[in-house]
Amino acid sequence: MKGAFPAVRAFVCLAALAAACDADAPFAPALALVADPATVEAGGTTKLKLAGEALVDAGDRTYSWHASGGTIAGRGGGAIWTAPGVIGRYTISVSDERSDAPIASARIMVRRFGPLPPEGCTVRCESIFTGSLRKDQVEALDMPRNVAGAEAIGLDDDALVVLVRAGKGARAYPLNVLAYHEVVNDELGGGKITVSYSPLTGAASVFASGDSGGFGNLGAFYDSDHLLYDRRTNSTWSPLRFECIRGERLGTLLAPIPFVIGKWGAIASLELGATVTWPVAADPTRTDYSRNPYAWYEADDGHIVGPLSYFDLRLPRKQRVIGVWRGGAARAYPYARLGARAVVNDALNGRDLVVAFDAGSGIGAAFDRTIAGRLLSFEMIEAGSLARHMRDLQTGSSWSILGEAVDGPLKGSRLGLLSRYQGFFFAWAAYRQGTEIWR
């Protein structure tokens, strides 16, 4: 996805060397190379500046700038570095006229793979995989039948659902239903939304559909994730990237809507008054919404459909993760490492967050842990429940696993939901190449 990066100032990999000192000096004056921001996307730029007490006596000294990749242009104690088109860590160093040895250096992380290609797509056009599917062969659901939870006959308590909350509305979209249709065009909370689910990546996406006329299945894939088309312009969209990747609306971004995935019984126990999308199958012998038709695929870690732009072998391919990104930084929180229950206070590229997870309910999410400008830290309530999963240390308020304060001074407050990816690791790693992995 496109977007501007926040200005994050960071001191990275400092190297102050004795070349800047007089031979009789007891120590080398500290020099630091400051990168702003410290993490960039491929093709992006960062500002570099020398800082430290040694600059006081530098006068009109001439500096030379060097980079292990990309291009760099600098004068005096500052420079602009343009990142190359390949992810990885790159070393920037600076020397002066007294020595070729660097007087300071920094290592900068570059995310994503390559600049946008020139063929008329925001991804590599030749990597869009069509396979044997036809457009709309997997039929989208439009304005589906939505019922009270008790009326969803056949929906098992252990069935996973996508919970979406918009305005005063809450609705659960069972993955078993989404697996058969992959796209649901609906209305919730007074607005038009689209719920997308790719069984091949195990990932859902929810976004405002606006004036698109609704979305349908294109019958094509990129990085194994299904691609959609909008009915107004027939442009091609990647729901995983929330982006139009080809066609009239090329480069347009979708407006994501936060969601949580969890077991229906657990979601129902939180008494949100959620309705359920539960259509009547036209042919029950072929469409059985009470079962997961892709259970075999999820169990086969080596089976992936279509080419991938990037392979990451650090985790099993189909291990489920919660994915969070900010600017050029991304981090995956594997379910397997979070254990039975977890509360993780963390920070990513300047954003303070908390990850809440409960394996029994299948619910996991990342939240912004700042409320009205106040930073909170959380601990897990050991004998807690889904309704009282964690407690903030600043006020003692109890919070549900959905990030809502249920008692204490902050009762009624809600944490902002940050995670927009819950699915298989291989797809997240291809989408956010160079992702960090928690622990």
Image (tube, grey):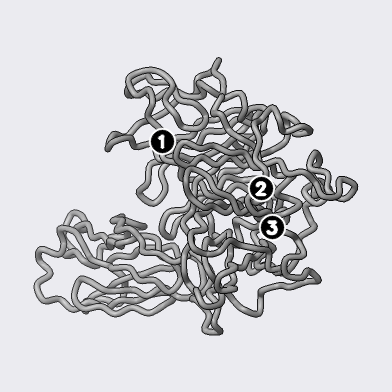
Q: Amino acid at mark 1?
A: Leu
Query: Mark 3 or mark 1, which is nearer the start of the sequence?
Result: 3
Q: Residue at x 38, y 42 (%)?
A: 352
Q: CA distance from mark 1 to mark 3?
A: 32 Å
Q: Is residue 375 left or right of residue 166?
A: left
Judged by depth in the image, the label closer to the viewer, 1 or 3, is 3
Across and down, in percent, residue 224 comes to 69, 63
Residue position marked by numbered label 3 in the rendering: 140
Q: Nearer the viewer, residue 310 or 262?
A: 262
Instruction: Tell me the tag on residue 332.
Output: none
* Residue 80, image x, y percentages: 29, 74
For residue 415, the mark is 1
Residue at left offset 26%, top offset 60%: 32
* Residue 314 at least partly seen: no
Kind of residue indicated by mark 3 = Ala
Identified by mark 2, the residue type is Pro
Give the quarter of the image for residue 103.
Answer: bottom left
Residue 336 on image: x %, y %: 65, 38
Residues at discs 1 and 2 in contact (Cβ within 8 Å): no
Mark 2, Cα crowd under 10 Å, few <14 / some 14-19 / many 20+, is some
Q: CA distance from mark 1 to mark 2?
A: 30 Å
Which of these two is toward me, 167 or 161?
A: 167
Q: Say which residue appears at 29% left-offset and 58% top-offset.
A: 7
Image label count: 3
Query: How packed is label 3: few (under 14 Cα within 10 Å), some, or many (20 or more)?
Result: many
Closer to the camera, 409 or 144?
A: 144
Q: Residues within 10 Å of mark 1 (few under 14, many from 20)?
A: some
Apparent side of residue 10 relative to residue 353 in the rendered image (left or right)? left
**Mark 2 or mark 1, which is nearer the start of the sequence?**
2
Identify the secondary structure beneath mark 3: loop
